[in-house]
Image (spheres, rainbow, N blue to C red):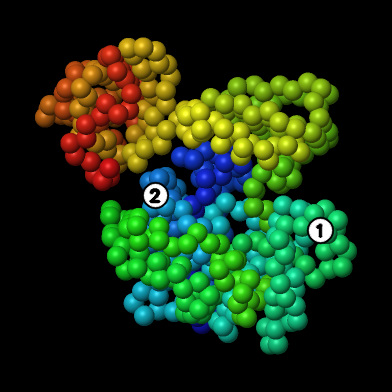
Amino acid sequence: MTDTPFQPVILSGGSGTRLWPLSRRTYPKQLLALVGDGSLLQQAVQRLAGTEGRAAPIIIANDDHRFLVRQQLTDIGVTPEALILEPVGRNTAPAVALACHAAMAGGRDPVIGIFASDHRIEDESAFTESLRKAIAAAAEGWIVTFSIAPTRPETGYGYIRHGAPVPGLEGVNIVDGFVEKPDAATAQSYLDQGGYGWNSGMFVFRASVMLRELRTLAPEVEAAAARAHAAAQQDIGFTRLDAALFGAAPSLSIDVAVMERTRHAATVTADMGWSDLGSWGALYETAGHDAHANATIGRVATRDTSGSYLRSEDGRLLTAIGIEDMVVVSTADAVLVAPKDRAGEVKEIVADLSQERVAEAEYHRRVARPWGTYEDIDKEDGFRVKRIIVNPGGRLSLQRHRRRSEHWVVVRGTAHVTIDGEEQVLTRNMSTYVSVGATHRLENKGPEPLHMIEVQVGDYVEEDDIERLEDVYGR
């Protein structure tokens, strides 16, 4: 490709409310296995693995997702160059500025690639070839974006208008302009005349070039990111930013801050089977279809049904009779039913649910924790039953409860339990009791996940009845 080092950066800060009820604020779409093997984040990391000269990726993630992101990277054997936590969302321009400062630490000046964590790319060889061209152009001082060859008159994407070829750089054109999301007639005209592509939101550039443009075109963004990076703290493998310093950055996309104004924008046209998976309609388009144009995932049975996206995530049987062009998505605690052409309105209904403080708007029944997960099985006044899974090496905080006792039963694996300073080892079909006020801790020191049933009894059984005395995760 080039002798210039290549630093991939993956942005993983989105909430993905347009794919509710699968995607929720605390477990967004990039962390889900929506298509293919592994989560979208894992796929984004793995498709860059063979890039020549590649450093370990820099990940910029939402602070709320830090343990989930790190666990998913660990699961695929990846240790990031840095895992930077955004304390507040400020759009992509501050994130790009942060990435530049992080990549230039120690006097380096690599070519940086900015990639979303939640996109689908079917043809990875075409992606690799397009990236090769983009890295070569970036090494020459261009800020390169990928222009996706359009396959339909899409009104949900912005477009790039291609200019003249860049001399001496294969497959690279000057950007003649960016176009906002067009109406259907305009989108069709772009297809008819050619010379336009979908704006993919992926960028490749030399770090010093982007910082120079940010200082010129969006100086408040660059200055806030520089201050936040300089004051960053390392915390058990995470890079933490000061919320006030980073929050001072204007909330701007990199398109608005730089790409639409720079004189150094270039584009590589790519036909790689790309989708931003931004809606149920997009997922329908990327899925396999049966003879009646239905996309079915999970346990689904249909009769006289066509053109629909039907997905069961909870193991229950989903059946559909006599429907057409619908989206039906079933999870353990919520169901979405909508005409396919109105499924984009899910974002509005999630906002309504959030305003009404409906828990399902933000949380799955299975709740992720840095040590594993828990899931409510039953709950009424005075008691609560959970299934708890502790990952190998997982260690809950040393804690106590003021208003409830707990009964633990091991159903799989080995538990190391400490209660008021005394340790015991529990295996399958063994149990123990934690009285109100007892200091206790649960650990999994074994190589396999630990599965337990917990029965809480008391006059208050909510999560805020936890007094943490010691916690390896810094909560």
Name the residue: 72% across, 42% down. Answer: 281
Q: Amino acid at mark 2?
A: Asp
Along the line of sight, which residue is nearer the eye, 76 or 378?
378
Between discs 2 and 1, the one toward the N terminus: 2
Identity of the residue furthest to the right in this view: 192
Mark sitting on residue 187: 1
Secondary element at tag 1: helix
Say which of 46 and 27 sits in front. 27
- Disc 2 is placed on an element classified as helix
* Residue 19 picture location, percent across and down: 61, 40
Quadrant position of residue 240: bottom left
User: Would you call the spot at circle 1 few (<14 residues within 10 Å), some (14-19), or many (20 or more)?
Assistant: many
From the top left corner, tell me how far across and down residue 269 is, in percent.
72, 69
Which amino acid type is marked by label 1?
A: Ala
Answer above or below: position of 464 versus 38: above
Image quadrant holding the C terminus, namely: top left
Q: Residue at position x 18%, y 36% from top?
A: 469
314 in relation to 122, above or below: above
Outermost residue toward the bottom in this view: 168
Mark number for residue 5?
Answer: none
Q: Is residue 355 above or below residue 88?
A: above
**Residue at left offset 32%, top offset 68%:** 230
Quadrant of the frame with the N terminus: bottom right
Q: Position of residue 450 (x, y in %)?
A: 34, 31
Task: Classify mark 2: residues with Cα within 10 Å, few (<14), some (14-19) or many (20+).
Answer: many
Nearer to us in this view, 308 or 130: 308
**Which mark identifies residue 63?**
2
Closer to us: mark 2 or mark 1? 1
In the rendered image, the residue lying farthest to the left is 421
- Could you tell whether 87 is left or right of 122 in the image? left
Q: Residue at x 60, y 22 (%)?
A: 316
